[in-house]
Image (tube, coloured by chain):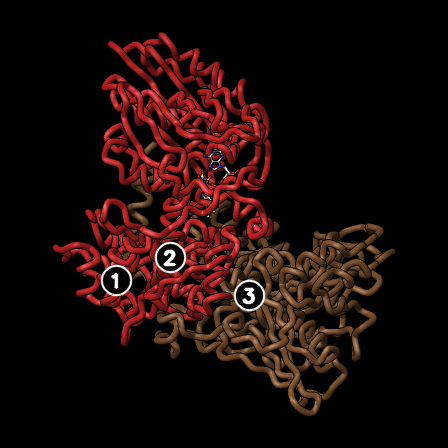
Amino acid sequence: MIKFILNNTEVSTDQHPGTAVLDFIRYRQNLTGTKIGCREGDCGACTVLVGELTNGDIRYRSMTSCLMPLANANGKHIVTVEGINGDGLNPVQQAMYDESATQCGFCTPGFVMSMVGFSLQHEITNAPKEAVDSVDGNICRCTGYKSIQRAATRVGELVSTRKSDPVAFAIEQKFVPEYFASIPSRLKALSDNLSAVKNIEVADYRVGGGTDLYVQKHEAMSHAKLDFFFDNPAMKGIRIEGNRCILGASTTVTDLVESKEFRKLFPDFEIYYKLVSSTPIRNMATIAGNIVNASPIGDFTAFFLALNASVLLTDDKSSREIELRKFYLGYKKLDKRPEEYIKTISFEIPSKHTRFNFEKVSKRTNLDIASVNTAIRLDITEGIISNAGVSAGGIGPIPTYLFKASEYLNGKKVSLELLPELISIVQSEIAPISDARGTEEYKRLLLSQLLKAHFLVLFPELDEAKILTI
Amino acid sequence: MKNIDSFTHLRGESVYLDDIPVLRGTLYGVAFDSPIAHGEITKLDVSEAESFPGVIRVFTAKDVPGENQIGGIVPDEPLFADHHVHFCGMPIAFVVAETEEAARMAIKKIKLEIKGLPVITDPREAQAKGELIVPPRKFVIGNSDEAFSKCTYVFEGKADSNGQEHLYIETQGAYTYPMENGGIRIHSSTQGPTAVQRACAKVLGVPMHQLEVDVTRLGGGFGGKEDQANTWAALCAMASHLLTRPVKYSLHRMEDMRMTGKRHPYSSDYKIGLSRDLKILAYEATFYQNAGAAADLSPAVLERTLFHCTNSYFIPNVTATAYSCRTHLPPNTAFRGFGGPQGMFVIECAIARAAEELGVPAIEIQKKNLIQSGNEFPYGQIAVSEASECWNRAEEVYSLKEIIAQIDLFNSKE
Ligand SMILES: Cc1cc2nc3c(=O)[nH]c(=O)nc-3n(C[C@H](O)[C@H](O)[C@H](O)COP(=O)(O)OP(=O)(O)OC[C@H]3O[C@@H](n4cnc5c(N)ncnc54)[C@H](O)[C@@H]3O)c2cc1C
Ligand code: FES
Ligand code: FES
């Protein structure tokens, strides 16, 4: 039995745990304010808020209900547009009304939910801008976005006046109805008689956030035998042990974003993560999911390859650790037995001698997968590269660790002169194909340029003009 | 501009097609469509699909009670592929079942054999083979041939503009149910209720007054739900008519993108002639419109291309020819601008080309040739024009000079 609070009502259901939350709320609960635009996580029309109690603290995050299994709602507060409606219009709705930000209206509830989700967000530094960023997972075809941008900016301005607890503020400003105040204690009560969604001995699929599976195997998910990892406490958490950082397999991109320890290791992480999918997808997407999906253009695969990360595989009887760079055997072929799954991902933490950079080029800046991406990690002592790792995606059938390029850099003195040779070595070890994201030639050129970008970012002391003319 | 339904839109209370509460006994339909762009159907066996649990009926061309025809302007678009398929995504059968899921699973049980035939996707190839939707259209003013001989500069070139998916966020769909006295109510996510009514009446072989088309509000279709909404309405209405049951079909995004037409791609040739002081004296353009497999609204879109072929400029000698070319793409259709952008794009390419060759900024040519009140368009209309005032205002409001200076400065850096 899956139990959760849907808006202001406790519900329990014995529906198949793989049923998309979207289908449950629309067709079982008759809450039709949540719309269907794509069923692929791309349009945001189905956005709902998911409230979760951790250590007595409630956090709300936006998620695309089309990709979310019912099992991942267990024990949580699911909020649809019906659940935030008050008497008239709330401040988000009013701002959108005033700015004419709704036309055909089909995308509108999704935008409203993303912005209400923003109003409940904990960390806020530049609210007007962040409010606009919060709709990065919503598509509107009518308005041209300017009116929505103005509305979001107004919402952000209001939220920037917040001094109290996010939920208290949201209630006070009527972003959400009063009943939100009762949710933490109700979730607590619910958690006392909650049963974990049954783990199945032999599962057809293991589900993390579902953001790949529900796109690729949409029809199978509501019938298949599934095992759910997203809320498995043993697979959560980010911790530092000695000189290694260890991520639970179900760590989401947002968990990384919100982890102070992790952010300290990668000061520029904000630049990188903004290039990955969208707010609601980042709230769902797990790192293990990204690694096992093995897309040649995955972003965290490239990120962790350059860090020479390892994954800990287990079949619950025995475990083994394998370097990520040896994990990929061919297109979507992994050095992993079917019974094995990832428990943790770990990597050596960057030292003060380490420089790291990640670059991604895609057709659109937001909500797009890479044409080519690449990451680089260099340990440098007294001007000499003591340990190098270079990775790239979109240039072959697997997320690629560039063995030869990394080897070439080892022991070299940092200088401009490394670049031409580095580029030519990289060109010899990649095999991009022409597809919708670009021709082979274009991808080769992109990677060369991105290697230069790495140098520009990592070595501001080098002559910029010269790098650009190489 | 505020939408009149903003309040309910913002609260998620507006009712779209898939939000209509379903009636008891509602059945769900899903179209089975052609996997290839052109071919002859040699075998179609729906028996296994029909015996799939939950399936009520599988309809094909032979079940159509009226005419198997939904073409609006030209009757050249079968609802169901009969012996031939003309585009990838063309409906061949319509599976109706007790649940949407059963219908989707049953589709996989349909056995189809098709003998592939040559596929045309290039409008120029279609034109060369005489595959035209309607006879060519030509707009002429003055005498361009003669005028070219007097021009100081003449440039020729080719301009291609590609298609575009509407991506209305609500996909296409219809929900139909029988009423008293043999009537049918049709809820359709359409921009053209009358087109839906007319197409369905033809397919069902009933008078239009028997069919009631209900659409709460229009908008958000961008042209993609004019004639392209007819198919789904006709499929559901036909099933409702024959089964006397409510029938619903709300398309998945993938089906919608696969089966529906888009903005027309165009391939065009231009020839532009200018005087020494950059007045455009003569212009010749030939437009090859990629209409797809059926007329849909293509002839009207084609005319609009001609109407806009000189954009906001006055050109005294123009010959503009347009071909609506039949290819094996889904029937292309209306899309914001309705052919206008495809016409304007070509004259702008011609001007850009001339500017580049002559080493002058394109805006110099554009500004010099803006149409003035009293000038004549190539189709004979006398202009009442505010083009120059508009241009001058825009220069001022957007500080054009400064913007250009900034661009030049930026570009002067390595
Ligand atoms: C709209 C959209 C945009 C996207 N944009 C990007 C992008 O910009 N960059 C990018 O890299 N990706 C992107 N993705 C892809 C996806 O979000 C990521 O790959 C994500 O990290 C997958 O994680 P998940 O938990 O959702 O995976 P799931 O779908 O739950 O699982 C994916 C695969 O991993 C397996 N799996 C999950 N956890 C484990 C485990 N612990 N052990 C073994 N196997 C496991 C599953 O069985 C499945 O095979 C996008 C997806 C969508 C829908
Ligand atoms: S329906 Fe488009 S993101 Fe879920
Ligand atoms: S208002 Fe129509 S898609 Fe946004």
Q: Residue furthest top?
A: A411
The chain that appears red in the image is: A
Residue receiving disc 2: A4
Q: Nearer the viewer, mark 3 or mark 2?
A: 2
Q: Position of residue B404 (x, y in %)?
A: 32, 49
Q: Nearer the viewer, mark 1 or mark 2?
A: 2
Q: Mark 1 is on which residue type?
A: Phe
The chain that appears brown in the image is: B
Q: Is residue A107 left or right of residue B159?
A: left
Q: Mark 2 is on which residue type?
A: Phe
Q: Quadrant of the C terminus of chain A?
A: top left
Q: Nearer the viewer, residue B412 or B185?
A: B185
Chain letter of disc 2 in the image: A
Q: CA distance from mark 3 to mark 1?
A: 44 Å
Q: Position of residue B2 (x, y in %)?
A: 35, 75
Residue receiving disc 3: B335
Which residue is depicted at the point 30% across and 32% down? A238
Quadrant housing residue B253? bottom right
Q: Mark 3 is on which residue type?
A: Phe
Q: Position of residue B126 (x, y in %)?
A: 75, 56
> Looking at the image, can residue B359 be seen?
no
Neighbor class of circle 3 (other Cα within 10 Å; few <14, some 14-19, many 20+) is: many
> Looking at the image, can residue B114 be seen?
yes
- Label 3 C-beta lies within 8 Å of the nearest ligand 3 atom: no
Whichever of callouts 1 and 2 sits on the residue coming sooner in the sequence is 2
Q: Nearer the viewer, mark 3 or mark 1?
A: 1
User: Which numbered tag is attached to residue A180?
Assistant: 1
Q: Position of residue B137 (x, y in %)?
A: 69, 69
Q: CA distance from mark 1 to mark 2?
A: 14 Å
How many numbered marks appear? 3
